[in-house]
Amino acid sequence: MASVPAVADGPLSGAGVAGFLGPTPFFVVSSWDRDGGSDTSPRGDTPGFVQVIDGHTLAIPDRRGNKRADTSRNLLADDRISVAMLVPGRTDVLHLSGTAVVTDDANLLADMALGGAVPQAALIVTVERAEVRHNQAVAAANIWDRANRVDAATLSELMALTTRQLGVRKPALRWLARSLAALSPLIRRIINATYRRALKKEGYGVATGSRPGRPVRVIDVIRETSDAVTLVFSGADTGFAPGQFYTLIMEIDGRTVRRAYSATSVPGTDRLALTVKRNGLCSTYLNDHARVGTEMRVLGPSGNFGVTDPAAAGADYVLIGAGSGITPLMSIMRTVLAASPDTTITLHYGNRTEADIIFADELTAMRDAHPGRLTVHHVLSRPDPGWTGRTGRIGPDHLTCSEGAHYYVCGPAAMLTSVRDCLTGLGVASDRLHEEEFTSAPEAAPELTARTMTVENVGDVVVATGQTMLDAGLAAGVPMPYSCTVGSCGECRIQLLHGEVRGTVEDGGVLTCVSYPLTDTAVAIGPAEPRD
């Protein structure tokens, strides 16, 4: 994972920049030739491939699989360069500009080896300017929403399109078109197999032995309620959008466990605060055993829930949360109130009893510090004697439609459904309603027989008794996708080719973080290969 050295003094040490340099898997680079023409090329690699040399300098590997040399050729004539980096789940973009040279320094390239494969060259970029900016195009495209992804099965293959066009334009060659169409699945398999072999030679898909995430250390522990604690970390990437979450990786009783928690702090500082309510193995462990000095690892930020432009003038937000659903909303409130002088926020916060209210004193202090801008309504389902506030569950008796306001709702599935129905009935448009479901901790692992999970183009993985398919894959060094680890975000979904699992299976896919194999299984990371 890339990080800016602590002593760095330059554009790369700016607020939010490190939040892109470490987790980015993709960027586009623009360069110019001697005639004034330009070339913009995509670059993708394993997150962490961008190396930070100092506060002004980056090193970017050029893998052997890159058969185009446009950028390198242009830099020989004009050393100017511009880079735009993206991170999945974020709608802002890191823009870098400066100059660059191509190097074949053996020591530097050796440090960039992937699975033992050394890149053929590298770009050394001297950064003159680095700026994180909201990108309206990325936000409008909503590219990170899985619901917007096109089902690959509905797309025509390029080979099929070509052969159909050939048959229409050249009737005499229709026999050739039909022959090519018949061979299309076979040709695609050959091309895919060749491409995957080339990727393996480059080191992709090969376990490198590196541990996922970045190391962090607890520097403060704040007891919020008897069942909720805020942990403050140093060493984390705090370039998140208010509302996003992080995944903590920790060792509990000799077992590696992962759990997602929303940030409650303001982004861009040197401290990351995660507030954890007791609910399951990980949250109980953190409530009872986390101390100043405790070390663990963290992935993220992740998720697309939250406010993309906290400094927007005159914005109106209605925040609705229950229990630990206050955590992303707290980050939103802290950030927006500090960033925009005229934004108004109304918070509806539901709990069982007054003792369960997380951030009770701070919410009162924030309300008093921002009169007319922050309104707080507590709603208790089991009020103590003497409670004079609102009671019941958040619903029609508490909510109204505020024209132009954006509604952010966070809590368990039942609460989200109830509030959504209420707001829709009040006339709140769907594009002004944003939701984050908080899923309960996974149920106890079932006592099932160990099974073999065959990962396509990787090999066999043994899923031991009590292991999820995700845990087994990660333990074996397989690059399994994941984020929340509780079956909520859908990022761990892969293709189930055959076999039976206990857990969530939908449309041929399985959520590996909450699934256990009942039989030997075969899976594919990414779109499944076509099968006869």
Image (tube, rainbow, N blue to C red):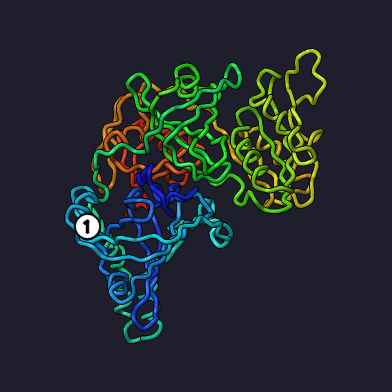
Instruction: Please tell me which residue lies in front, 527 or 270.
Output: 270
Instruction: Please tell me which residue lies in front, 349 or 7.
Output: 7
Mark 1 burial class by Cα count in 10 Å: few <14, some 14-19, many 20+? many
Tell me if I can see residue 130 in this picture. yes
Tell me if I can see residue 502 in this picture. no
- Residue occupying image coordinates x 46% and y 46%: 507
Q: Check disc 1 and report the residue beneath it.
A: 119
Residue 285 at x, y percent in the picture = 45, 20
User: Measured along the vertical axis of the image, is residue 522 above or below residue 502?
Assistant: below
- Residue occupying image coordinates x 62% and y 47%: 307
| Element type at mark 1 | loop
User: Measured along the vertical axis of the image, is residue 101 above or below residue 316?
Assistant: below
Residue 200 at x, y percent in the picture = 22, 52
- Residue occupying image coordinates x 71% and y 19%: 354
Quadrant of image for the N terminus: top left
Quadrant of image for the C terminus: bottom left
Q: Amino acid at mark 1?
A: Pro
Instruction: Please tell me which residue lies in front, 247 or 362.
Output: 362
Residue 22 at x, y percent in the picture = 39, 47
